[in-house]
Image (tube, rainbow, N blue to C red):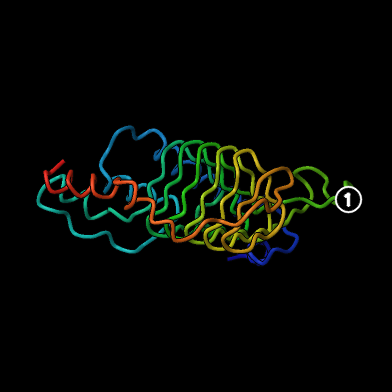
């Protein structure tokens, strides 16, 4: 890794249009295109294509004896609906049970993490990259840029068309209202909305709604019936 790339990961000024980083973005663009154009496929194939984007080398489980049993092996693997757009892929870490709906954009100049069981709606943008305010430094594609890590905690829910800006950290269980622009950290179990996003209330806890509503019982009956 070059010192220029190391500076990018540290959140320091670096140059994005060096041959090394242009090639890294092109590799990711090709991998994203394969993921986005695969069409209806198996969970195993989705996992293979996603690992190509992120350059994950952890081996996948051995194939199951039937298509259904093989899909079941990936029950907690992140579910990411195409299309998705990512700069590098290698700076993205996504936990188990995450769902990302279509048209997500992740600019992973720096590390972007998404905690387990987080749900992300359509058209969400997560930006870890930014630019100097001074135009004499910025200088278009000839000048340097920089970034800040973004961390989305476990069990969050990000509404549609949300924008999360560089350096933001969302605590566990945070809910972000649709159309919001998140510009600063959010404490765990808070609901935020607006531009810029502000805390509007606490997240309700221990409601046990899945059980008391009957939804869980219905699911268990369907599973027992093989549906």
Pointer 1 residue: 134
- The answer to whether 81 appears left or right of 107 in the picture is left
Residue 108 point in image, percent of width and height: 59, 53
What residue do we see at 37% from left, 55% from top?
Answer: 97
Judge the density around disc 1: few (<14), some (14-19), many (≥20) Cα neighbours within 10 Å. few
Decide: is 112 above or below 177.
Answer: below
- The answer to whether 64 appears left or right of 38 in the picture is left
Residue 186 point in image, percent of width and height: 65, 59
What residue do we see at 50% from left, 52% from top?
Answer: 89
Residue 224 point in image, percent of width and height: 13, 48
- The answer to whether 65 appears left or right of 92 in the picture is left
Q: Dividing the image into 4 quarters, which one contains the N terminus?
A: bottom right
Q: Residue furthest front?
A: 212
What residue do we see at 83% from left, 45% from top?
Answer: 139
Q: In the structure shown, which secondary structural element does the residue marked by tag 1 occupy? A: loop
Decide: is 222 above or below 146.
Answer: above
Q: Dividing the image into 4 quarters, which one contains the C terminus?
A: top left
Q: Nearer the viewer, residue 47 or 173?
A: 173
Q: Nearer the viewer, residue 216 or 2?
A: 216
Residue 52 point in image, percent of width and height: 39, 51
**What is the total number of numbered labels drawn onto the structure image?**
1
- The answer to whether 34 appears left or right of 185 in the picture is left
């Amino acid at each position: 890794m070059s010192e220029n790339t190391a500076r990018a990961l540290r959140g320091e000024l670096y140059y994005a249009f060096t041959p090394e980083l242009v090639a890294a973005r092109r590799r990711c663009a090709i991998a994203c295109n394969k993921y986005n154009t695969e069409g209806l496929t198996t969970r195993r194939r989705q996992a293979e294509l996603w690992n190509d984007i992120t350059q994950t080398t952890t081996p996948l489980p051995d194939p199951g004896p039937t298509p259904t049993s093989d899909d079941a092996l990936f029950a907690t693997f992140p579910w990411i609906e195409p299309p998705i757009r990512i700069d590098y892929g290698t700076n993205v870490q996504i936990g188990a049970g995450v769902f990302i709906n279509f048209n997500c954009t992740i600019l992973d100049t720096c590390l972007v993490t998404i905690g387990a069981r987080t749900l992300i709606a359509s058209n969400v943008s997560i930006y870890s990259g930014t630019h100097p305010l001074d135009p004499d430094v910025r200088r278009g594609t000839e000048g340097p840029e920089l970034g800040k890590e973004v961390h989305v905690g476990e069990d969050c829910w990000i509404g549609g068309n949300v924008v999360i800006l560089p350096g933001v950290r969302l605590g566990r269980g945070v809910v972000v209202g649709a159309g919001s622009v998140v510009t600063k950290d959010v404490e765990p179990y808070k609901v935020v909305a607006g531009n810029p996003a502000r805390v509007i209330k606490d997240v309700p806890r221990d409601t046990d709604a899945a059980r008391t509503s009957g939804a869980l019982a219905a699911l268990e009956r369907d599973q027992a019936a093989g549906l």
